[in-house]
Amino acid sequence: MWFRRDLRLDDNAALHHALKSARRVYCAFVFDRAILDELLAAGLRHDRRVDFIHRSLRELDAELRACGGALIVRHGFAADEIVRLAGELRVDAVFTNHDYEPYAVERDSAVAARLAAVGRKLHTFKDQVIFERDEVLTGAGRPFSVFTPYKNAWLKALTPFYLRSYEVRRHVSALAPPPVPAALPMLEDIGFAPTDLDELKVATGASGGRRLFEEFTSRIDRYAQARDYPAVRGPSYLSVHLRFGTVSIRELARFAHERAATSPGAATWLSELIWRDFYQQILHHHPQVVTRSFKPEYDRIQWDDAPELFAAWCEGRTGYPLVDAAMAQINRTGYMHNRLRMVTASFLTKDLGIDWRRGERYFARRLIDYDLAANNGGWQWAASSGCDAQPYFRIFNPVAQSEKFDPEGKFIRRYLPQLAHLSAQEIHAPWLLPPLRQREAGCVIGADYPAPVVDHAQARQRTLARYAVVKSR
Ligand SMILES: Cc1cc2nc3c(=O)[nH]c(=O)nc-3n(C[C@H](O)[C@H](O)[C@H](O)COP(=O)(O)OP(=O)(O)OC[C@H]3O[C@@H](n4cnc5c(N)ncnc54)[C@H](O)[C@@H]3O)c2cc1C
């Protein structure tokens, strides 16, 4: 059993099938140098995701040991390591769960071919989504590119079969202690260093995912009202667990679906889980979105290079408090609230005129829950270049967004203490305050806090002109 983004024992599709069909099952995980070397080259030795995985593996290994097995952990190029390990263990087959990212698809087909060449099989299963690939199609048999009809078809196709739990505990007698070295390396052994996950109170492993989900079940009914306000504990914060499979999507969707008829909060949350499936199937059917606009005409847009504006955005120095507080959140914690992901992505593309791909890459490095399909989908939505995206002439006003979604400025104050003494009315656009008031509140624009790097009204006009190429032909 080859674990990847499914770091849990319970309700794990591939593990269930392996245990049911084999007399002896060994479990393995590879710290894949094809991914990790890039992080190290980018200077990300203190990467929270690697730390999250490492901690989650420690827990998984302990659980496997309690059931008579253990986790074999290797560090190398995943395809090489898995093929070699399969030989060392002399297994008939390798079991694993689907991964829809282009790199993973290529890697897995190489592994399948190399295993087949020596008479071994690769068995793969759907595990991280409810519906995958071609399971939800339009009446004409085409993939959906608009969310609402996809969601309706998704809900229509849903039966208890798709939400079932894969029993693992009953079959663990097949787990075998590995006859090869199995110890989990230290983070330092693979070139990384521990991070501040404890300080940030990020609960790791399947136990962390379970606690967080249980806590969220008491708040889910209020999700629809609370989810848009970054100062409030509205969302579930389960994204990192969904990313690494330390929770089961089927368990989450089952809970939300059972409650949806009577709870608008649960119905709204279920929709978000459907968005997740939606973007995964977009990535499967349109892998070119990784580098290109979903709507090809949007690649005619001429973006600005603007290195200074880009640096101001990355570092949270744009002079727009909500944008800067949001960038401080991602930079300090590796998480950003969904509303703020929309606001900051819109600001980069439509106020600063910078290519969505640069923002997408920045988020990819910083987010602990970074997921190629969701991040790409979110960025292309904000840039209007994506499937079912925001129309290009709808441009978020960063001050209006701030007044609406952080009305008292609580979130802004949490991340930008230099604005703490401004009132709820003043905090959204501090450059409008008279100099005397700025001095009195300890927030002089240009000294304590930057002046806006662009004028929103002018930027809006430039964006409308920039995007005009989209409709001109
Ligand atoms: C520009 C941009 C970039 C984004 N990048 C990512 C990313 O890298 N990884 C990621 O998981 N999500 C991403 N999202 C989607 C969303 O912002 C996060 O999933 C959410 O903020 C995570 O917090 P939560 O777990 O508390 O969410 P909740 O509100 O509790 O939602 C529950 C789950 O539903 C899924 N979900 C929610 N919204 C979306 C969405 N719009 N698209 C796909 N899945 C969704 C996530 O798995 C999330 O954990 C991005 C959105 C935007 C606009």
Image (cartoon, rainbow, N blue to C red):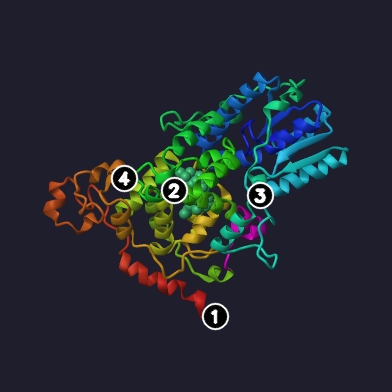
Which structural element holds mark 1? loop
Residues at circles 1 and 2 in contact by the CB criterion of under 8 Å = no
Is tag 1's residue or tag 4's residue first in the polypeptide sequence? 4
Q: Which mark, by number, is residue 473?
A: 1
Question: Which label lies toward us, 2 or 3?
Answer: 2
Inter-mark Cα distance, 3 to 1: 34 Å
Inter-mark Cα distance, 2 to 3: 29 Å
The amino acid type of the residue labelled 2 equals: Gly
Which structural element holds mark 4? helix
The amino acid type of the residue labelled 1 equals: Arg
The answer to which of 319 and 212 lies nearer the viewer is: 212
Which residue has dot 4 on it? 411
Which residue has dot 2 on it? 265
* Residue shown at 71% from the left, 37% from the top: 14
Q: Give the range drawn in magenta.
A: 280-295
The answer to which of 253 and 470 lies nearer the viewer is: 253
Q: Which mark, by number, is residue 100?
A: 3
The amino acid type of the residue labelled 3 equals: Tyr
Looking at the image, is 174 positioned above or below residue 297?
above
